[in-house]
Amino acid sequence: MDTVFIRELAVDTVIGVYDWEREVRQTLLLDLDMAWDNRPAAAGDDLSHALNYAAVADRIVAFLGGSEFLLIETAAEEIAALVRSEFGVPWLRLRLCKPGAVAAARDVGVVIERGERSA
């Protein structure tokens, strides 16, 4: 199975448990690896058989931009479910980061894997 990826997708959203976090938009950074068989798209040079990473990115930006979460864990689970169901992705690895959440760290976040990665 091949991998289609998106790196450092920046999305502004409402995220956090503190009162001040509920009043501002913060930037989350997302890395996404998605299992996909690229051979059909490559054989016909045909986008309709490819996993359209631009469409995936646009959908995530729209979803997160219109959402409010307390926990980054919940946001990650919701994004993973959305990508798998709406785009038919059988397996993904998602890294979701919240830069600036810990003063002494560049960023903090979660990495999750969902689904089955076939050969």
Image (cartoon, rainbow, N blue to C red):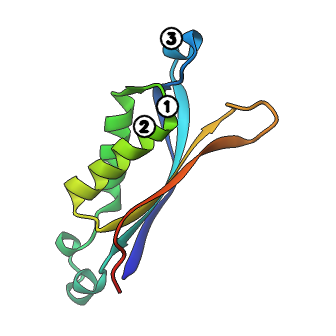
Q: Position of residue 60 (x, y in %)?
A: 35, 44
* Residues at marks 3 and 2 touching, judged by CB atoms closer than 8 Å: no
Residue 3, percent from left and from top: 42, 74
Which residue in the rendered view is the most extreme toward the right? 104
On screen, residue 3 above or below 64? below
Position above or below: 89 against 54 = below
Q: Which residue is mark 2?
A: 74
| Amino acid type indicated by mark 1 | Leu
Name which residue lies at 55% across and 33% down: 27
Asked whether 34 or 18 is in front, the reply is: 18
Q: Which mark is residue 23?
A: 3
Report x, y in % for residue 90. 29, 68
In depth, the one of 38 and 81 nearer the eye is 81
Q: Which residue type carries mark 2?
A: Thr
Residue drawn at the location 53% of the way across and 38% of the way down: 28
**Amino acid type assigned to the residue bearing label 3 in the image:** Glu
> For the residue carrying disc 1, how many other residues have a C-alpha within 10 Å: few (<14), some (14-19), or many (20+)?
few
The location of residue 35, given as percent across then percent down, is 36, 72
**Residue 119 sits above or below residue 72 on the image:** below
Residue position marked by numbered label 1 in the rendering: 71
User: Is label 3 or label 2 in front?
Assistant: 2
Q: Residues within 10 Å of mark 3 (few under 14, many from 20)?
A: few
Task: Point out the tag, 1 or 3, that comes first from the N-terminus.
Answer: 3
Q: Residue at position x 82%, y 35% from top?
A: 104
Q: Are marks 1 and 2 in contact (CB under 8 Å)?
A: yes
In the image: residue 47, left or right of residue 17? left
Q: Is residue 66 above or below residue 50?
A: above
Q: Nearer the viewer, mark 1 or mark 3?
A: 1
Determine which of the numbered discs, if any, sits on residue 83 in the image. Answer: none
Q: Residue at x 22, y 84 (%)?
A: 40
Q: Tag 3, which secondary structure? A: loop
Q: CA distance from mark 1 to mark 2?
A: 5 Å
